[in-house]
Image (cartoon, grey):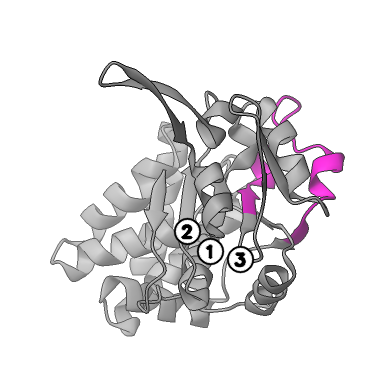
Amino acid sequence: MNVHPGTPQVPYYVALRNECALFEAAHANGLPLLLKGPTGCGKTRFVEHMAAQAGRRLYTVACHDDLSAADLIGRYLLRGGETEWVDGPLTRAVREGAICYLDEVVEARKDVTVVLHPLTDNRRTLMIDRTGEELVAPPGFMLIASYNPGYQNVLKRMKPSTRQRFLAITFGFPDPETEIAIVAQESGLEPGRVAPLVRLGGHIRNLSGADLEEGVSTRLLIYAATLIAGGMGVEKALEAAVIEPLSDDEDIQIALRDLVATVYG
């Protein structure tokens, strides 16, 4: 779990649609927000940016197979020979009127959904069974969740009854001009050298859905540009930041190297 205090320092983010206005409306009205989109397209950066803009503390939870409701709510721990209740990140966010962001929420265990439901309707409450408390979320509290629809399967699919408790917005990769600006800003590599990287990214994304599970993320393009800006050769940077992370399949890696050769000559 990461905790980001509300500070004047706002992480860099370029709005692609109306997502900033939607966030502001959701926050002002106490409505939960669901972010849908592929890996590395800017969902987490968007949340960090908007939380900083709003001056709200942000609790980010990376959901996984073993994440339970108790991990979010809290548990009794033995400290100094005494049993003490320790709030989890969701409980702290509710108490403080902060923002709680559940990244890849469908990866969490099923009991997490039961906990979230009362926070995503007009009750805006969190029941802590172990202590008997029922917390009512103050106006500043906001619940945000994200997931990647492309990776859903029968066992890890968000139920319609849960989806329909959230406002929702779909994120995608930015247009080439915007992506060049983002990668250049984040990596320090001049835009002229970023342009072929972004062009390569577009070609790779056209392959996704066939042999490649998912296209290259903006995040990976930033990694590659950062390596290049630091003096690493383009071929080595792309091997480490793009080709190897995208696939272990030798044939796919060969196809990716062919694309690199086509773009860079």
Which of the pair 8/105 is nearer the observer? Answer: 8
Image coordinates for residue 19, horizontal then vertical, percent: 66, 73
Q: How far apart, in angstroms, are the residues tagged by discs 2 and 3? A: 11 Å
Relative to 153, residue 151 above or below: below
Looking at the rendered image, the quarter that the C terminus falls into is bottom left
Q: Are marks 1 and 2 in contact (CB under 8 Å)?
A: yes
The amino acid beneath tag 1 is Val
Seen at 34% across and 83% down, the residue is 191
| Residue 230 picture location, percent across and down | 15, 66
Indicate the secondary structure of the residue bearing disc 3. loop
Residue range (magenta)? 144-168
Q: Is residue 166 located in the magenta-colored stretch of the structure?
A: yes
The CA span between labels 1 and 2 is 9 Å
Q: Is residue 1 visible?
A: yes
Tell us which disc is closer to us: 1 or 2.
Answer: 2
Disc 2 is placed on an element classified as strand
User: Measuring 37% from the left and 47% from the top, which residue is drawn there?
Assistant: 243
Q: Pinpoint residue 248: horizontal percent, then vertical percent.
A: 41, 32
Q: Nearer the viewer, residue 250 or 27?
A: 27
- The x, y position of residue 74, in whole percent, is 51, 32
Is 198 on the left or on the right of 79, as rendered? right
Disc number placed over residue 153 in the picture, else none: none
Residue at image location 60% in from the left, 49% down from the top: 208
**Residue 58 shows which numbered tag?**
2
Marking on residue 47: 1
Q: Would residue 198 be counted in the magenta stretch?
A: no
Q: What is the three-letter code of the residue carrying label 2?
A: Leu
Taking the image as shown, residue 187 lies to the left or right of residue 147, namely left
Residue type, label 3? Gly
* Residue placed most toward the observer, 212 or 46: 46
